[in-house]
Amino acid sequence: MSFKELPIMSDKQKGALLFYPYISKKSAQNIKKVLSTRWIGQGPGVDKFEKKFQQIFSKKNSALATGSGTDSLHLAYLLAGLKKGDEVITTVFTCTATNIPLLYIGANIKFADIDPMTMNISIDSVKKLISKKTKAIVCVHYGGLPCEMNELQKLSRKYKIPIIEDAAHAMGAKYNGKPVGSISDFTTFSFQAIKHFTTGDGGMLTIKNNKLLKKAKRLRWFGIDREGKQNGTWENDVFETGYKYQMTDIAATLGYDSLLDFNKILNHRRKIFKIYLDKLSKNKNIICINDDDKKKYHSAWLFTIALEKKDFLQKKLREYRIETNQVHFRNDRYSIFKKFVKGQKFKNMDFIENKYLVLPLHHKISSKQAVDISNLINKII
């Protein structure tokens, strides 16, 4: 077994697990209440969750709850008007969920390189890829660190193309004081189980052009005007292909309860992040993936380091029952994207591909554990 293939740790083992879902103490009782009503699928709980989310994160932008972050991305691409053959610039380094919905549409994917110090999309690489055929730019806020949104917005205005933010890592992040979710044409969130905010599985799409909300709701539900149908209009036409991308009231209840606790979750994660950063940034053999740009407010989903002896460190930490891993991988290595990368090179991705490692960061990691993990890493490397 290579060190890259270490299995996940059992949650029965003592130690520091890489991920652990946060569930509000109120949720068991509140879900029990939902189960005693007629609405366990999409119902008033989803509406309530959307309104609360919009109030906190998307502000004037509409918020639409979905069954997954991938659902939200697909809807964003459809609402942006992307069609077969359209060129879309996206990052080479992300979960495949960012880019697989582009395959649904038949878009022509143009992979951009990353900035090796942040692992976010490289603005210089994006600029080189823009052409008359470019119809959208997709950016991912890796680990919860916002991308260079000022530069991306300049490109959006200059070329009249939308920015679609994949904020799967970035709930609670801010740029220039604005919450991620309130900035771009479309922003998508993931509430999958390992995220710092979860509904078991689920997602959210925020939309700047509120006139698109009605269409978004149709696409979320088979192309049917669901509200019209519930109000008694049963003979409404279906004139566009829709999907089954709705959230349930069970999931929305989990989400709403955790929204009430979100500041506590975020503050704890940022405290752990700062401990790692303060202690590990002094180690000359380690690069902490971060940015000191004051415009950026980190949501602390991941703390990532880069070092030459990544495999050695991962193995040694596992001996102390500390789980680490890489979490995401470069998309150009996957066969499904092969035709989009012929002849292309990604020098920054190549540089850091085998060097990065994610450390445990969640509500069950205490400040003392973060200090101990940091001290152990500094002792090993």
Image (cartoon, helix red, strand yellow):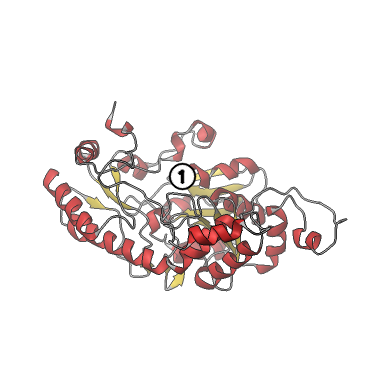
Q: Amino acid at mark 1?
A: Cys
Would residue 297 be seen by someone viewing this image from the given angle?
A: no
Q: Position of residue 116 (x, y in %)?
A: 33, 50
Viewport quadrant of the C terminus: top left
Front position in the image: 118 or 178: 178
Would residue 97 be seen by someone viewing this image from the given angle?
A: yes
Q: Position of residue 342 (x, y in %)?
A: 49, 33
Front position in the image: 35 or 315: 35
- The residue tagged 1 is 95
* Point 32% across, 47% down: residue: 18
In this rendering, the answer to whether 118 lies above or below 177 is: above
Q: Residue furthest left?
A: 379
In this rendering, the answer to whether 242 lies above or below 279 is: above
* Point 42% across, 40% down: residue: 330
Viewport quadrant of the N terminus: top left
186 vs 143, left or right, is: right
Residue 63 appears in which quarter of the rendering?
Answer: bottom right
Q: Position of residue 261 (x, y in %)?
A: 42, 67
The local crowd at label 1, few if under 14, some if 14 to 19, many if 20 or more residues have their Cα within 10 Å, is some
In this rendering, the answer to whether 213 lies above or below 8 is: below
Residue 6 appears in which quarter of the rendering?
Answer: top left
Q: Position of residue 68 (x, y in %)?
A: 56, 50
Q: Label 1, secondary structure: give it.
A: loop
Q: Residue furthest right?
A: 235
